[in-house]
Image (tube, rainbow, N blue to C red):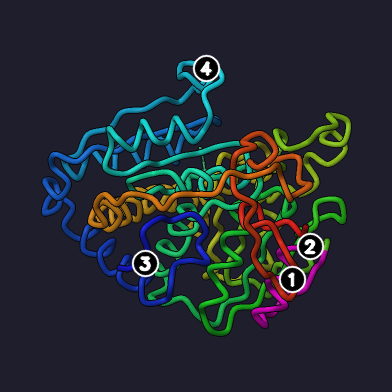
Amino acid sequence: MKLRNLIDIEDLSLEEWNELYGLASQIIAHPKDFSQALQGDVMASLFYEPSTRTNFSFQTAMLRLGGSVFGFADPKSSSAAKGETLKDTIKMVSAYADVIVMRSPQEGAAKAASLYAETPVINAGDGGHMHPTQTLTDLTTIAACRGEIRDLNIGLCGDLKNGRTVHSLIKAMAKFEGIRFYLIAPRDLAIPAYMVDFMKANNQKFVEVTNLEATMPQLDVLYMTRIQRERFTDPLEYDRLKGVYVLTRSKLRSAKKDLMILHPLPRVDEIAQDVDDDPRAMYFEQARYGMFARMALLMKMVEQGRKRPEAQPIGTGPLCHNKNCVTQTELYLPGLTKNIGGKCCCAYCDKEI
Ligand code: CP
């Protein structure tokens, strides 16, 4: 596997996905065979934002591989609270660890960290931007349950504006054949412009709709998402939009018999409790598949070993106007751009410059 860091799922080739899924499948079949695979290796777990699944599944993944874990789940307990830069924190942590797993409320934070780390960096979620290991979870669930990933009508429902899991999943699906997206969201929570540009640039089939029930009969996969309260600046706006979609058992009457209902979790109220016992509800199994997918990823990342990072030019301030972009606070970062569908975009957060 060539990939050194997992920052954006876009960076993972189809061959690399197949390699990862092959390893994850072996781990699922014979987990005990891998109980010493990372013995003596250490994972740093830096969570600047709350998490249950991603944090715990990475920790248990490393422990089940025979490795060890250190880190924090509250940045107030680290020297970030004293004003230490992300760069200095990462330089220190990469001196102690063999792989870094990092979640941040800032978009592009894992990309920034990867510029200064001697060890591989895994993005465990950066603001409303990307969540590539949730996507490995989602792909593993679909592949394990359906045998392959192709020819699927996928409904993405809820907060498509702020839902990083949705953005990563769309990017990943650009590599698979016969995928059509139904983007089910109110106008105020529609998919961001940079994702529309990405889908158009990659000839992905998609339609934007607002009605979940009317779309239900077409779907092979329904991916429900939470309205992301923590990304709203106006609490009244959140109150207006919360509860906009609630999946209930009665709404599933028109659904296919083999529909897969997925959700990255946590849920609030967007899936009613009475759906949990429907055999099509896969979200708790999905979270368990995530642990196996992360075991495979950790093995591949630790294999990369240590490497001195290239010297970076000192930045002169942010090029990007996104107030949640990591470049707004880590002012030394080099200004980096990328092309998305012919537009000049920030290489940290993907927003158009
Ligand atoms: N799916 C997911 O990222 O859940 P957590 O926020 O609990 O990690």
> Label 1 belongs to which residue?
197
Q: Position of residue 235 (x, y in %)?
A: 83, 29
Question: Picture quarter containing residue 209?
Answer: bottom right
Element type at marker 1?
Answer: helix
Numbered range of the magenta stretch: 193-209
Q: Are marks 3 and 4 in contact (CB under 8 Å)?
A: no
The image quarter containing residue 99 is: top left
**Residue ID for mark 2:** 193
Front position among marks 3 and 4: 4
Residue 240 is left or right of residue 174, and the answer is right
Q: Please state the horizontal and vertical placement of residue 69, each as a whole percent of the image.
A: 28, 32
Q: Is residue 349 left or right of residue 235?
A: left
Q: Which residue is mark 4?
A: 76
Q: Position of residue 55 (x, y in %)?
A: 42, 36
Q: CA distance from mark 1 to mark 4?
A: 37 Å
Mark 4 element type: helix
